[in-house]
Amino acid sequence: MSTPTGKPFNPFDDPTIYDPIGAVLGYLRFSFTTLATLFICLRMGFDWAAARIPLQFAPFAIFAVASSWWADSFSIALQNSLCLFTMWIAVSLIVHRSGAAAAVIASMYLTALIVVTSAFVALVFPKIGIHTGNEVFQAAHAGRWRGIFAHKNSLGPWAAYGSVTFFTHIRMIKNANMIFWWIARISAVLCLLLSGSATALFVATTMLLVYFFLKLLCQSNGPTVIVIAAIILVSLGYFVNLFSDQLWALVGRDASLTGRSEIWEFARSYIWDEGLFFGQGFMMEGGANYLSRMTALFLQPIAGAESGYLTLILDLGLIGFVLFIVPYFSALRNGLQWIRVLEGEERSAVVYMSMTIIGSLVHGISESTAFLATGFDGVICFGALFFLLSLPKSPAKLTRFSSSFSSETSQAKLPVA
């Protein structure tokens, strides 16, 4: 395989400059999701499929496709938005067809495979799995683990998910090989710590706190738990504000988040002046003009705004931002309603998905890839979002979704009003 310069691809070269896997990944995703959708629709019927597609996400998906008309590159924006569109349908159907518990277990195995492989590559092939310092723009990250990815921040979310869920949800896996899962746990923690991703550390911490909150909510009076959670959050906020410099220094950062605050300020001013309501096109990361101005200001090309929220507004404006965020709150509302009435692995599955959604929202504060359907971890985050979003608002409205929690070969264990 040749690089754009005509030289043979060398895995020891800087993968942040040319990633041959990333060059074809979009086509593979589109092909797989399209085929999966057709297969499930033919097998289960179009009525079954239509009932399980979360329509609240439709306005955003349609708006993303429409944005290709005003994007700098029609073909790139259209390709990415169609990938999102097909993923929205296919992932929703796959999760419902397999069942919530089976989907969570598959997610855990996928996460384990990634962190174990990444730890192996970093330890055995450090020139591939660790930032060497020879990269053109990533020299400052020398010594940080990146595993099988091109950048340490791509490894971060997987490490965060695994470092928490491998300890909180392992009981969902019947007859689990604990030797393998202890290897996965150790690998996840090592990847979390040695990647040096401060965002991943905060995501893991948040997911762990959410897990204990949801477990307490399942066992105690709802209003009491909410009051306790509010007190804890206010106390944590005061503590973080009081010791912010020490906390940032603990994770190797400064209060500006390694220059992110300057990038955010530039992005906010650009958004206000250019495309406040409609943006520059889906996944254009600000467009060519934004990138050239960013490069001139910071002396390196910085695509997006180093924040999922700001990058989303850059791409689709305030309209797209609202269309994207509102479904998250609907999904979380559904999750909070359902965990109170479910038991066993179904409850654990909903807890897992709620943790994942909140983790992705935290991830989006300082990472641009948090809300990308074409991101490596997008299948985990969007799978959780789409499943919770497509549940009935009330647990009493349950009939046509009874097979969504357990596969159709087993008995669903849901209360029917």
Image: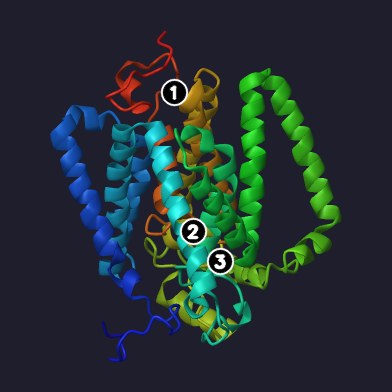
List x then y, in percent, for residue 316: 42, 57
Residue nearer the viewer, 241 or 166: 166
Front residue (pair 45, 56):
45
Most distant residue in the left direction:
42
**Residue 329 appears in view:** no
Residue at the limit of the structure toward the right, as seen here = 242
Q: Amino acid at mark 3?
A: Glu
Give x and y (percent) for residue 148.
45, 68
Residue 408 in percent (x, y) is at 27, 25
Q: On the rendered structure, is 29 left or right of 366?
A: left
Could you tell me if residue 46 is visible in this image? yes
The residues tagged by marks 2 and 1 sit, at their Cα atoms, a distance apart of 38 Å
Against 416, is 115 above or below? below
Q: Which residue has dot 3 on it? A: 306
Which element is circle 1 on? loop
Residue at 32%, 45% in the rendered image: 88
Q: Amino acid at mark 1?
A: Lys
Give the x, y percent position of residue 309: 53, 56
Q: Nearer the viewer, residue 147 or 317?
A: 147
Q: Residues within 10 Å of mark 3 (few under 14, many from 20)?
A: many
Judging by the rendered image, the residue that carries numbered circle 2 is 116
Of mark 3 and mark 1, the one earlier in the sequence is 3
Of callouts 3 and 2, the N-terminal one: 2
Left/right placement of residue 129 relative to residue 143 reads: left
**Which of the two discs, 3 and 2, sits closer to the camera?**
2
Q: Which residue is mark 1?
A: 393
**Callout 1 crowding tier (Cα within 10 Å): few <14, some 14–19, many ≥20:** some
Q: Amino acid at mark 2?
A: Val
Q: Which residue in the rendered view is the most extreme toward the top?
A: 417
